[in-house]
Image (cartoon, helix red, strand yellow):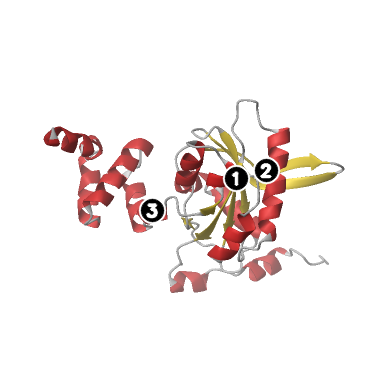
Amino acid sequence: MQESAGQILLQPVAEIPWFHNVILNQKLKSPAQRLWYAKMTMEQGWSRPVLIQKIESDLYHRQGKAVNNFKATLPPPQSDLAEQAVKDPYVFDLMAMAEGLRERELEAGLIDQIQSFLIELGVGFAFVGRQVRLEVGDKEYYIDLLFYHLRLRCYIVVELKTGEFKPEYAGKMNFYLTAVDERLRHADDKPSIGLILCKAKHRLTAEYALRGISTPIGVADWKAPALPEPLRRSLPSVAQLEAELGVGGHNT
């Protein structure tokens, strides 16, 4: 019986390609982590480069770590599934995104690399649109990024921030989720979930901001790997690009 249980436990390792197992053995000392990455590889169909990136970005310890109010706003098992669908921090391989990036530029960069962005978000996310328009009353509002999660069966509203988390972001997200549920949600869909991605956050501030809010919201950091210094020096800054293109000035 013990042997049978061990065989079941090791099944993901046996079902992934041999070279993937070589990577797991070379890069990981913990058997529990090897098994976890093998299971994720089997479920999500990771290629070898993706598996290496996930290990090097320490996905094992990031999964399910976002500040959230899911247990207070969603019934089980939806709350548990939602919690595992978010992570902290998110690591975006944006290559050449300079310091001081504005939110629209970050958003455009992610959409340009939507495939790698979706891989980092995780299995189940389907891209719906960018700057999705919502008309409420006599005003127009625009959601940064809208996804539909195929496993959770709900819309995921993503707001991107290039600075530190502020409590008022939770109120704005609550408004967006209410509007999406009223305007876009189908009768068979589960309640929409919000994800606020910031450059940084104070965890306790985020926890306080989510208390008392009735819509499910997660707050997580995002980061991009730093470019090598020689390459960073060779890239023009945002200000230089604007000057070169005449953006924000008057053409003569």
Q: What amino acid is found at the position of numbered circle 1 in the picture?
A: Pro
Q: Secondary structure at mark 2?
A: helix
Which is nearer the N-term, disc 1 or disc 2? 2
Left or right, 2 with reference to 32 = left
The answer, for residue 201, to whether it is visible in the render is no
**As drawn, 200 above or below 115:** below
Residue behind mark 3: 59
The quarter of the image holding the N terminus is top left
Closer mark to the observer between disc 1 and disc 3: 1
Q: Are marks 3 and 2 in contact (CB under 8 Å)?
A: no
Q: Position of residue 10 (x, y in %)?
A: 20, 39
Say which of 221 and 174 sits in front. Answer: 174
Residue displayed at 36% across by 52% down: 60
Q: What distance separates the C-alpha of mark 1 from that of mark 2? A: 9 Å
Q: Amino acid at mark 2?
A: Leu
Sequence-first tag of 1 and 3: 3
